[in-house]
Amino acid sequence: MCGITGYIGKRDATPILIEGLKKLEYRGYDSAGIALLKKGKMTVCKKKGRVDVLAGLMRKNPFKANLGISHTRWATHGGVTDENAHPHVSSDGMFALVHNGIIENYENMKRFLVKKGYTFSSQTDSEALVNLIAYHYQYRTSDKDENRFLEAVRKALIHVEGTYGIAVLCKDKPDELVAARKGSPLLIGIGKDERLVSSDVLGFAGRANNVIYLEDGQVASITKDNCDIISIGNTPVEYTIKEIDWQLENADLNGAKHFMQKEIFEQPKAIENAIRGRISEDQATAILQGLNMTPNDMRQIDRIIFCACGTAWHACLVAEQLIERYARIPVEVEYASEFRYRNIPIEKNTLVFVISQSGETIDTLEALRESKRKGFKTLAITNAIASTISRESDGGLYQYAGKEVGVASTKAFTSQVAICLLIALYIGRMRDMSYSVGKDIINALKSLPETIEKTLKTAPQIKKIAKKYACKNDFLFLGRLDEFPIALEGALKLKEISYIHAEAYPAGEMKHGPIALICPECPSVVFACAEDVLAKIVSNAQEIKARKGAVIAITCFPEAFKDIADDIITVPKVHDSIRTIIDTVPAQLLAYYIALERGCDVDKPRNLAKAVTVE
């Protein structure tokens, strides 16, 4: 969840590291720090707060070096303090370390190290690891060993239980940086006479055109012009150098006020990219070669499980509705964070999908591994090419939505839903879906970019509605059938960026408890584009009004709400298969404008991170 950058080369490391950290600010953090090494002298500067605070301190106390590591921390072990910020230095002053992940057995490590005379100045698990490296360097390696630094890190990591992405400096080795990963992403960027390390390709800040993706259980010795990688078991590793497509990694605001705003308005293009080349109009079906399954393989599937977290989990709920409706296969949706801890009975003809925008979500990655461990075909939907999930899955589909920087997911969610509809179409046409139904879905998919553009034109109206309700501290979101997951997503967006308490329920469940919340201070957002249950949702809205609750209707049937709703957001009437995507856009805009009215930082909401890489 945190950000790591490292540099070794011929240039001054400080501005490069600070620039890299700024590129990673979107990931979420509460403190930042830097360690620099030159001719055996190490200097460390770290401070709670934003990267700009750190940059200011470095300007006041400049230290030029060609080797350094830096970090943005999202607190896990220990509070938000200067002492708990990274980098951490071993108590003998020999090593500095930055760490993403969680060391689960750090307390045992700490007790052992205290007995050996090592001291601690923070509450973090990471400080135990840097002291363990120092211990192995002093007592478990030889000063005659050319690879003593690498060996100390490797031997220390053998004892670690948990996850890590680390970059380490050693005072004895002013021309070497060591990095390692297990469960937390880490990449090595290759430039001319320089190497960079980061937890995200954006941390290279456009300075490297080629990259090495470290795999779990690998440790790398990095110099300005070389990289040697071994396994934790001390086996040399052959690696592949890949080219970075900076077009896919673009993260500029391009005139927008916030990344969230930019990404909401990028949804027509994101959807267009998601479906491009994946439609066969002649056959009225989808072309999904990335699934790596033959038509016969697919016909054998009689059950599908979707696993994801957060917004991606809501996309899975929509997928459940779409696949059951159009492909006639039972679908179950599991929280990835629960999947590997449950003993779920899974029959042999089950297909598992995992969805993760970043491709690095640790819970989803572990769900994928658990599924594969049990022998099930496991496919991925992800937006990050060469991410860990995309590399470890048996196949899958990229979203091609472009880099999503805003912590609150927008364009990634709607492109995930579009891809799930393609999957429903693909499987359905292999079974009993008619050509005409397939053709209708294709026409609906093709119309999506233009229809989203029309829906985005509601933004000025929604901005006015946001001003009206921004003072409220409780919201209720209601929907039926496939609009219930959109109610969940709308409530989540509002919670994430405006810190308003919001609940979502299937509208039919309102009388079974949530109706107790209805009052003038708790507005209700009602999704009403499903014609077959329109009368039911209108009835729910009437029940809210009878109890003096405000109703905001998002509907393509405005006449049905003209005497009921306080505010009506009219969206285009579309084919049933795509209505959830259209419903989502006003909910995103409502959350965005309410957050602005409340003075919230929509791109960096408190306590949240873009990529959740710790359990």
Image: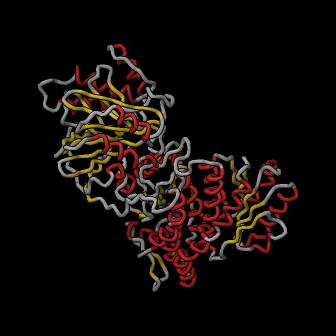
Task: Give the farthest residue toward the right.
Answer: 546
| Identity of the residue drawn at 61% across and 64% down | 584
Where on the picture, by quarter, is residue 209?
A: bottom left
Q: Give how far across and how far down residue 504 sits, in percent.
A: 69, 53
Q: Give how far across and how far down residue 607 sits, in percent.
A: 54, 41
- In the rendered view, tell whether residue 284 sits above or below residue 237: below
| In this picture, residue 544 sits left or right of residue 44 | right
Instruction: Tell which of 403 and 215 is nearer to you.
Output: 403
Q: Give how far across and how far down residue 162 sits, in percent.
A: 40, 35
Q: Quadrant of the N terminus?
A: top left
Q: Examine the rendering and report whether any part of residue 614 can be seen.
A: yes
| Identity of the residue drawn at 68% across and 66% down | 461
| In this picture, residue 369 sits left or right of residue 315 | left
Task: Give the farthest residue toward the left.
Answer: 144
Instruction: Tell which of 95 and 320 is nearer to you.
Output: 95
Q: Examine the rendering and report whether any part of residue 343 can be seen.
A: no
Where on the picture, by quarter, is residue 327?
A: bottom right
Q: How many marks?
A: 0
Instruction: Tell which of 454 and 150 is nearer to you.
Output: 454
| Identity of the residue drawn at 31% across and 50% down | 204
Q: Give how far across and how far down residue 515 sits, in percent.
A: 81, 51
The colour scheme applied to this rendered structure is secondary structure
| In this picture, residue 204 sits left or right of residue 432 | left
